[in-house]
Image: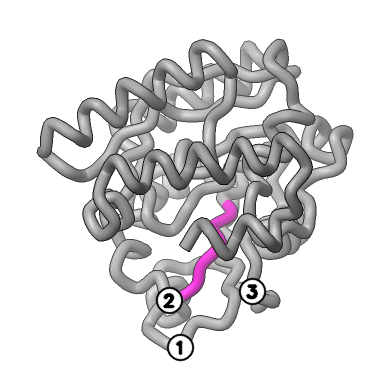
Amino acid sequence: MLSVIIPTLNAEQGLTRTMAPLVPAAIDGLVRDVIVTDGGSDDLTLDIADEAGATIVKSTRGRGQQLKEGAQAAQGDWLLFLHADTVLTGNWNQEIRTHIEKHTEQAAAFRFALDDDAGRARLMEKLVRLRCAVFALPYGDQGLLISRNHYDEIGGFGELPLMEDVDIVRRIGRRRLRFLKSQAVTSAARYQKYGYIIRAVRNLTCVMLYFVGVKPETIRKLYG
């Protein structure tokens, strides 16, 4: 029923945690296959994916390209695109079943959360919820659930090195996008490395540059 596509590049630190919730869902028949599309890892990423029973697709580096190739290899009627440092929690599998049964014409994203107990993380989560409520603009770290028919109808992921998530959400449109209650808990490493304020401002700047027409290749240099 469901194919999960995970783009990777030296993702050994988080991939095991990302894959763990998918195993029970595979056993109960929800997840048909897990596709790990790798952009040239030289750590243990491919070993972890292989041990977990994932189908490995070797790709050129670039998240948009990797997601596109993963979708091409997927066998499910529904696709779930998930970052390699994001862990689904709560009743995510039941929420997906309900969505598939009742909202066949809509895509969906999860609720954003960070694996950090700091108050700054809670503030960032609130800001993301506000962004989603006002602009209906989830990022890739919230996952993306979409039917194969809907995905093909809008042309799928573009071969972009960055902003591939914003690009596809814009083509989906507000009316065809729902937000699920279950959390997609993402690594806070980037925020901790650069500082929450600096990271948030950088993310916002990148999105604004994209909306005014700056090429993703140029934005990527700023993103870090």
Q: Earlier in the sequence, mark 3 or mark 2?
A: 2
Q: Which mark is residue 61?
A: 3
Picture coordinates of residue 60, whole percent (x, y): 69, 77
Name the residue that disc number 2 marks.
10
- Find out whether the residues at labels 3 and 2 contact each other: C-beta distance under 8 Å: no
Residue 7 inside the magenta-drawn segment = yes
Neighbour class for label 1 at 10 Å: few (<14), some, many (≥20)? few
Label 2: element kind: loop
Task: Using the numbered discs, state the Cα–Cα distance from disc 2 to disc 1 in whole angstroms.
Answer: 6 Å
Label 1: element kind: loop
Amino acid type of the residue tagged 2 in the rendering: Asn
- Find out whether the residues at labels 2 and 1 contact each other: C-beta distance under 8 Å: yes
Residue at the spot 61% in from the left edge and 36% down from the top edge: 208
Residue at the spot 59% in from the left edge and 75% down from the top edge: 39
Name the residue that disc number 1 marks.
42
- Residue that sits furthest to the bottom in the current view: 42
Q: Magenta stretch mostly in which secondary structure?
A: strand
